[in-house]
Amino acid sequence: MWRFFCLISLSAAFSVPRYYNSSHHDTSTQMPMKEVDSTVVPLPARCIPEPKVVSLRTGEDLSLQYFPSCTRVDRCGGCCTLEEFFSCQPTEIEILNMRVIIHKYTGGNKLMPVGTEIVKVEKHLKCKCDCIVKEKDCNSLQKYVKQQCKCMCINDDEKEKCLQADPKLKFWDSTSCSCQCLNVKDCTTGYVFNKHTCSCESEQRQPAGQHNNDFFGR
């Protein structure tokens, strides 16, 4: 009898569907999630215009009630190959003029009509995967390489000098295209940090015209 009871208990245990606690998504609710036994082959999310929720509030005045407060408009979305370099971006846009109704809280849960407002909202018509980093993101010491979707430093001489310096003191920063100290120290009174030597030096030793914010080789 005891063996029969154990077999029934085990059978019941294995017949119960598996549930997951969703508390890692939202700690305020306990929502069971059933796991589907069969596997699903996902479809790729192509880079296309798709409905996205867009706020229609134009100000931060919380006493104003907008109706509707949000809507759905087509915006570019989806996956791109090499997502560290590419993102889904619009290539054709139109502006929608949306009329919203505005009321104002006057106290006692009462609303007073204020009027209407035209809110301009972007609607994406066409999309494509394109570089995240654009030519406009490059500084004066960089050139844009479209094939690699990145800005590259053009001051090679300064880079070479920096790489020949003590690696325990300096490194080459490819974002600012400058040689910088690994550790910037807070100096005591009467001393300033020299970014050429990466050390604290007496203010009296600072050459005329040299400022504390000068970088190596610049």
Image (spheres, rainbow, N blue to C red):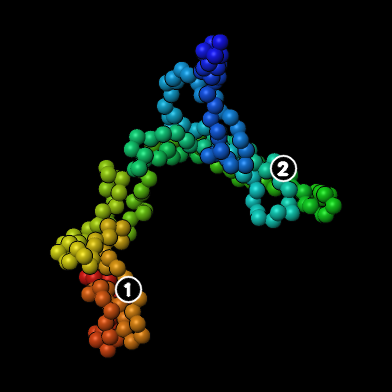
Tell how many labels. 2
Whether residue 91 can be seen here: no
Extreme residue toward the front, this view? 1
**Upstream in sequence: badge 2 or badge 1:** 2
Residue 124 sits above or below residue 18 on the image: below
Whether residue 133 can be seen here: yes
Quarter of the figure with the C terminus: bottom left
Mark 2 Cα-neighbour bin, 10 Å: few <14, some 14–19, many ≥20: some
- Label 2–label 1 contact, CB within 8 A: no
Residue 16: % across, % down: 55, 19
Residue drawn 35% across and 76% down? Answer: 186
Residue 131 sits above or below residue 22 on the image: below
Residue 127: % across, % down: 44, 35
Residue 59: % across, % down: 65, 54
Front one among 93 and 77: 77
Instruction: Name the residue type under label 1.
Output: Lys
Instruction: Name the residue type under label 2.
Output: Phe
SS class, disc 1 = loop
SS class, disc 2 = strand
Residue drawn 24% across and 86% down? Answer: 205
Residue 47: % across, % down: 43, 32
* Residue named by callout 2: 67
Quarter of the figure with the N terminus: top right
Residue drawn 53% across and 39% down? Answer: 24
Mark identifier at residue 50? none
* Residue named by callout 1: 185
